[in-house]
Amino acid sequence: MLIDKIAEIFYNHTERRTMKMKIGNKLNQLRKLSGMTQEQLAEKIDVSRQTISKWESDSTSPDLESIV
């Protein structure tokens, strides 16, 4: 499940800086592999499409509570 994979990314990174550098690209890849749009993913995890866009561009980093 996509949400489980996203949560796994967070648990696998111990250093926040490393996580931020990789999370956006990984989230984008997983979303596209799942055939989802940013809007669809946003609805699924109850955030805005703009939030997904910011996460994918590494403008902001998601907090664990947002995706679990």
Image (spheres, grey):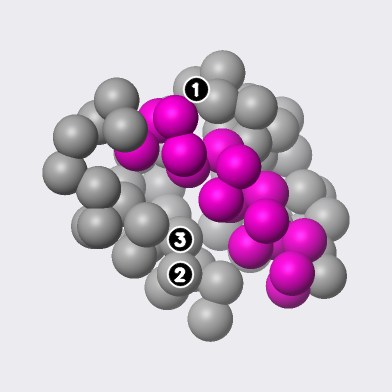
Left or right of 32, for residue 42: left
Q: Residue 67: image x %, image y %? A: 43, 55
Residue nearest the viewer, comparing 28 with 44: 28
Residue 23 inside the magenta-drawn segment: yes
| Residue 51 visible within the image | no
Residue 7 location (% of width, % of height): 37, 61
Hey, what amino acid is under mark 2?
Lys
Question: Is there a contact, CB below 8 Å, between mark 2 and mark 3?
Answer: yes
Q: Residue 36, located in which quarter of the rendered image? A: bottom right
Dot 1: within a 10 Å radius of its alpha carbon, few (fewer than 14), some, or many (20 or more) residues? some
- Residue occupying the point 70% across, 33% down: 53
Residue most extreme to the left: 14
Q: Nearer the viewer, residue 48 or 31?
A: 31
Q: Taking 51 as reference, is 61 left or right?
A: left
Does residue 53 sit above or below 35 in this rendering? above
Question: Can you give x and y, in whole percent of width and height, for residue 47 in the image?
Answer: 59, 44
Residue shown at 45%/69% (left/top)? 5
Spatial distance from mark 1 to mark 2, Cα to Cα?
A: 19 Å
Residue displayed at 77% across by 61% down: 32
Q: Is residue 8 left or right of residue 38?
A: left
Q: Secondary structure at mark 3?
A: helix
The residue where tag 2 is placed is 5
Q: Which residues are magenta?
A: 19-34
Marker disc for residue 60: 1
